[in-house]
Amino acid sequence: MAVSDKDRLRRILLLCSSFARNLAYFRAGQEKENLPLLQERVPFSSFWRQVNGNAIDIAILDWCKLFADKNGEHWTKLVKNRAAFETGLMRHLGVTAGIFEEYAKELRLYRNKYAGHSDAEKSAEIPDMALAKSAAEFLIEHITGEAAPGDLDGADGTGIKAAYDTWLAEARELLSRHRH
């Protein structure tokens, strides 16, 4: 059964939201005041370590579906003018297409070695996620701008930036309750 553009748009919005939510949760756990909760043997530290690790894994898996895996819900399957989108994305990010492809490879490598498979590496080098976050925000703004009336079913993709801040604050609050 063929997937409609409306359904694909909805799935991309959900992936972008999931990416941003999980990135916010991960970043909250990595803040200086929260690191002891993740690193020391204090009540709930095992839980928070697991949640924090899962959050970055899911964020990278979701981002790869959108930008690094053309078999997934890749942006090329929905964006109407691919050349204009790619040019705008590179301008927005301040990088070349080659640099962006190398960055996507870095996230795919993390996905393949740590999130998607069980390689024998002792520790994972988590990529800098600033470019990924900016790319996802650009994608949301672009596709919601292209959407036909009624395609979003009331969803406002431009709210991802505000939602990210809300999710970050939510995670900070929950983590603060367990710090000693």
Image (cartoon, grey):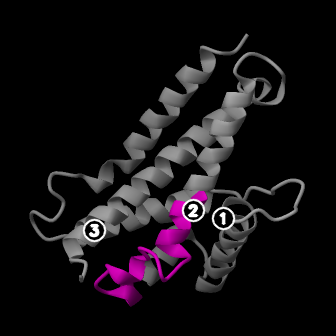
> In the rendered structure, which segment of residues is drawn in magenta?
60-85
Identify which amino acid the numbered label 2 is placed on: Leu
Residue position for label 1: 116
Q: Nearer the viewer, mark 1 or mark 3?
A: 1
Q: Is residue 27 left or right of residue 124?
A: left
Counting from the top left corner in percent of width and height, residue 104 is at 63, 74
How packed mark 1 is, by other alpha carbons closer than 10 Å (few <14, some 14-19, many 20 or more), is some
Q: Is residue 180 magenta?
A: no
* Residue 84 can be seen, yes or no: yes
Q: Earlier in the sequence, mark 2 or mark 1?
A: 2
Q: Name the one closer to the observer, 74 or 72.
A: 72
Identify which amino acid the numbered label 1 is placed on: Gly
Q: Which label number is shown at residue 61?
A: 2
Helix, strand or loop under label 3 = helix
Residue position for label 3: 9
How packed mark 3 is, by other alpha carbons closer than 10 Å (few <14, some 14-19, many 20 or more), is many
- Image quadrant holding the C terminus, namely top right
